[in-house]
Amino acid sequence: MLAKLPGLIRLPIVALLLALNVIVHVLVLFAFTLIKVIVPVRAIRLACSRLLVGIAESWIGVNNVLFDAFTQTRWTIEGLDGLRRNGNYLVLCNHQSWVDIPVLQKVFNRRIPFLRFFLKSQLIWVPLLGPAWWALDFPFMKRYSRETLAKRPELQGKDREATRRACEKFRHMPVSVMNFAEGTRFTPEKHAAQSSPYRHLLRPKAGGLAFVLDAMGDALHAIVDVTIVYPNGSGTMMDLIAGRIRDIRVHVRELPIDNTLRGNYEEDAAFRERFQSWVNVLWNEKDAQIERMRA
């Protein structure tokens, strides 16, 4: 019913409700974050951490209800059987648009531990959302260009140190660590510039993926390999809110993690070659999966 309202009426309503949802949940989130920061009792801080995750899952849940009520997007989701809320997962996904994030949140909210993404350090300044991500222990990464590293070699490895610190924190809580292995959103221009061997994907960055697996150690139970397809184009967040993305298809499969996927990627040449080969096989399979889903 609501999804059939004229756009001029429906869009302002859903935008207002989404904004109110952000404000209400973030204010509650900040209140418990303040308690967590100022009370030096471990049990209270752990309880606050669990509450913060519950608030975030409620926030996502309300967003999902609004998307379902105000859009006519058709969802096709396969492969969720067997996933656990108390499992620890590394979630891998192809990356096409900012829409990927609410899609992943809808698919996995309250099915697996709360998803956490590695974010660019600049995003901490996004009003309301940046501090909320910080409160929820999202790791912020400061990446340096080759030119900057050439001028200041002491910065070499700082991003890896930040990754390891974040992963150490995640070892002591149920977590799903999200990784877009392509490192950036797919566009035809980027695909051509890379001379990517894949039809629907950019080249994966195996080094960062290997580092997370090594840093997390045996705290991770499995890899959740996710493939998202938008048959009519991924669009933007506004397209999602406006209901212009009419078809979203998601395929999920769980992959085991064994000791062959853990090692020193930078210093062990044999492991590096073996890991790159594994990632390339995975990406070939994902490329073929996208072709089937598009068909």
Image (cartoon, grey):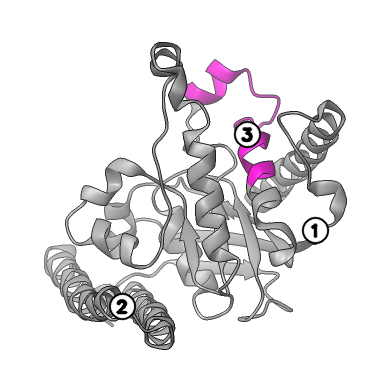
Which of the numbered marks, if any, corresponds to residue 36? 2
Q: Quadrant of residue 268 in the image?
A: top right
The residue beneath circle 1 is 257
Instruction: Using the numbered discs, state the Cα–Cα distance from disc 3 to disc 1 in whole angstroms.
Output: 18 Å
Task: Examine the rendering and report whether any part of residue 253 can be seen.
Answer: no
Judged by depth in the image, the label closer to the viewer, 3 or 2, is 2
**Label 2, label 1: how far apart the Cα atoms are:** 34 Å
- Magenta run includes residue 207: yes
Q: CA distance from mark 3 to mark 2?
A: 36 Å
Q: Which residue is mark 3?
A: 205
Residue type at tag 3: Lys
Percent position (x, y) of residue 155? 44, 26
Looking at the rendering, which quadrant does residue 254 occupy? bottom right
Residue 132 is left or right of residue 262, and the answer is left
Q: Is disc 3 in contact with disc 2, using a CB cutoff of under 8 Å?
A: no
Q: Nearer the viewer, residue 51 or 13?
A: 51
Q: Residue at x 60, y 61 (%)?
A: 250
Q: Is residue 159 found inside the magenta-colored segment of the image? A: no
Q: Which residues are magenta?
A: 189-211
Q: Position of residue 106 (x, y in %)?
A: 47, 71
* Amino acid, disc 1: Ile
Q: Where 94 sits versus 152, above or below?
A: below
**Frontmost residue, 259 versus 250:** 259
